[in-house]
Amino acid sequence: MPFERVIGQQRIKHFFERAIKNKRLSHAYLFVGQSGVGKETMAIDLARKLLSPGGSETNPDKRVAALTHPDFEVLFPAPAKINEDERQNIKASIVENPYHRQQPWANPSISIASIREIKRKAAYKSFEGNGRVIVIFDCERLTIEAANSLLKILEEPPDKMYIIMTTANPSQLLPTIKSRCQVVKFDPLPVTLIEETLLRQGFETGKARLAARLASGSYKRSLEILGDDLQKGQAAALEFFRKSIQSNYLQLFYVEELMQRFQRDLKGVKELLSNLLIWFRDAMIYRESEESALTSLIHIEQVEVLKNFNNNFPNADLSGAMREIERSLELLGRNVQANLILIVLLNNLRTFVAGR
């Protein structure tokens, strides 16, 4: 079955099945969608078809999935001084499960040296005659020099070379790169589909259901959630809210404590704010929905907490609070200092909760 490793995304599967059948493939694709919805898995599975003789569905080339095919290259963001063991560990995680690639660094990039190596290989014929496929994960992480170098390849693509790029942040890409690619937009995954997939993986029913609800359409996020302490994450988000209505003096101490707890790890900070965003989303659903609709709550076991919040803060601007959290998450992605982001967010949340 074509693209069997890709969860859902039937519209995109059918698109590429037709494109391959009719031989109407673009030389460059930009896969756009939130993290963990299948962009990377689709990119690798598409490469398998393109590099298998005759685009074989019954016998796709296993070397592509193993990242060992001589005409297949995967680039991913990494520090400038990454060692070979670290590189192989990341590749091993991709081979094991493309939805759950290891991303241990806070602010990695894709260097111009990587793009120059692609250009060097493009000057030669492919090893096996079926062309070359280059996959670039998180292409918004290209340095300016690397992006400009890649642009030259896109402007004059070598014969039978396909470039597939993935991004969750297309706004951070050079417009000239986007304009030279066929953009393919991936949809968030339905909660029921994520839950079914987790159950097939052997996860316990209650945990699978909660993780699927918390994942916001991302299978990768659901796996991360199941690897964490779910109740601990929920409690941390509620603690952050409670600190937002305390004095500036106490907030400063709290932020310093958070920085020590996360050891400057942006991933932990992002998870905290993501859980906080979900909590405010539940508060809005509780306030604006009929009782029969409360089954859509993610933190359904915290109905009493949500009820007390809405009773105590009836004029809270929940939409404004959610926008402020989303803005903070965006600033974290731009590598703005996390402690400053958290201090400003706590201050602003106090205003939104008061309804001023």
Image (spheres, rainbow, N blue to C red):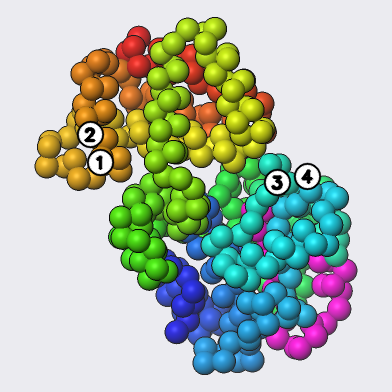
- In front: label 3 or label 1: 1
Q: Say which amino acid is labelled 2.
A: Val
For label 3, the residue is: 105
Q: Which is more foreground, mark 4 or mark 2? A: 2
- x, y percent for residue 306: 26, 29
Tell me whether circle 3 and circle 1 mark residues in contact (CB < 8 Å). Answer: no
What amino acid type is highlighted by mark number 3?
Trp
- Labels 3 and 2: the sequence-earlier one: 3
Label 1–label 2 contact, CB within 8 A: yes
Please give the residue where the numbered disc 4 appears in the rendered image: 144
- Name the residue tied to disc 1: 300
Question: For the point 16% across and 42% down, which residue is it?
Answer: 293
Q: What amino acid is labelled 4 in the image? A: Ile
Residue 265 horizontal side relative to residue 199, left or right: right
Q: Position of residue 194 (x, y in %)?
A: 37, 60
Q: Nearer the viewer, residue 3 or 120?
A: 3
Between 44 and 266, the one nearer to me in the picture:
266
